[in-house]
């Protein structure tokens, strides 16, 4: 039985964590009492938080900032951006740019981006979604799509027809232009470095890319660039 299933069986789905935080000054050394426990000079107070979670690790908490992503290298780039003096907008964009490289099937400059920001006490949103091509019109889409039984056209899920003009890259740039403290060029540098020097490919990314190969094999341009003998060969950790 997996650790996750064991945890659920023992404690149930609804679990809460309770810890202790010392309110006194940190001590230079700890002294063990006769029963083997640690005695500290500072008073301790219990705290609890309402978030319920399932897992073997405690919830991550930080005082000055946090970056959560689907890939550790991208999270590392975001945290380093904060350490270097960047703000939340800088870290978000640097992280997203890195995800384009290390987790491309989940985020890409060929897609869209959206942001909800809170700067200077104001909540605002940024819509970086793509637009239809300038020369496109509704009649063209109707002519090039298959009609369903009720007579309404359905845009296919594959090929060039459903693709909009990508809005992600300009969205990243506009976010930095509005709120960033770093130059957009500097935020690109970590991704450029990893692209040139290489990085390990995780087993999840490799599996996702290999699974997508049959869907894209029929598109000549993609096949010539990414596939070998109609297969996407990805070596985990390479």
Image (cartoon, grey):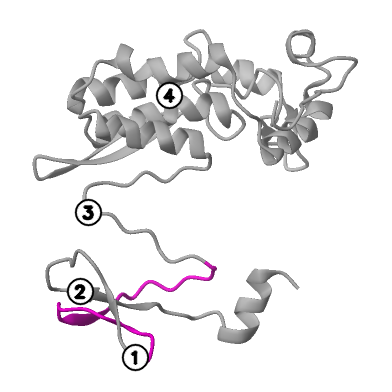
Please provide percent x and percent y for residue 170: 36, 18
Q: Is residue 203 left or right of residue 170?
A: right
The residue that disc 3 covers is: 63
Q: What is the distance, in whole Å, between disc 3 and disc 2 at their CAs?
A: 16 Å
> Which residue occupies 46% across, 33% down?
74
Please provide percent x and percent y for residue 220: 79, 9
Quadrant of the drawing holding the N terminus: bottom right
Q: Do the residues labelled 1 and 3 touch (CB within 8 Å)?
A: no
Q: How crowded is mark 2: few (under 14 residues within 10 Å), some or many (20 or more)?
A: few
Judged by depth in the image, the label closer to the viewer, 2 or 4, is 2
Residue 187 appears in which quarter of the rendering? Answer: top left
Front in this rendered view, residue 104 or 1 = 1
**Whether residue 165 can be seen here:** no
- Of pointers 4 and 3, the one earlier in the residue sequence: 3
Residue 168 numbered tag: 4
- Of pointers 2 and 4, the one earlier in the residue sequence: 2
The residue that disc 2 covers is: 22
The residue that disc 1 covers is: 34
Front in this rendered view, residue 110 or 59 = 59
Give the secondary structure at mark 1: loop
Q: How many marks?
A: 4
Q: Is residue 123 left or right of residue 199?
A: left
- Of pointers 4 and 1, the one earlier in the residue sequence: 1
The boundaries of the magenta stretch are: 34-56
Q: Residues within 10 Å of mark 3 (few under 14, many from 20)?
A: few
Q: What is the distance, in whole Å, between disc 4 and disc 3 at their CAs?
A: 30 Å
> Which residue occupies 32% across, 11% down?
185
């Amino acid at each position: 039985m997996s650790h996750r299933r064991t945890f659920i069986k023992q404690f149930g789905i609804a679990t809460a964590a309770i810890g202790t935080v010392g309110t006194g000054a940190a001590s230079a050394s700890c002294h063990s009492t006769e029963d083997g426990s640690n005695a500290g000079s500072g008073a301790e107070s219990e705290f609890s938080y309402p978030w319920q979670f399932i897992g073997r690790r405690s919830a991550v908490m930080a005082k000055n900032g946090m970056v959560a992503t689907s890939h550790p290298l991208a999270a590392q780039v975001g945290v380093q951006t904060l350490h270097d003096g960047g703000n939340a907008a800088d870290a978000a964009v640097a992280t997203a740019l890195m995800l384009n490289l290390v987790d491309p099937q989940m985020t890409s400059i060929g897609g869209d981006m959206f942001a909800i920001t809170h700067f200077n006490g104001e909540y605002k949103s940024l819509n970086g979604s793509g637009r239809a091509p300038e020369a496109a019109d509704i009649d063209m889409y109707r002519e090039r799509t298959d009609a369903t039984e009720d007579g309404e056209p359905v845009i296919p899920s594959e090929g060039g027809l459903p693709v909009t003009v990508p809005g992600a890259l300009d969205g990243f740039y506009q976010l930095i232009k509005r709120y960033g403290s770093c130059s957009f060029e500097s935020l690109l540098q970590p991704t450029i470095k990893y692209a040139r020097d290489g990085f390990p490919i995780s087993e999840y990314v490799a599996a996702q890319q290999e699974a997508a190969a049959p869907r894209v094999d029929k598109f000549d341009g993609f096949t010539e660039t990414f596939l070998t003998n109609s297969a996407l060969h990805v070596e985990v950790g390479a």
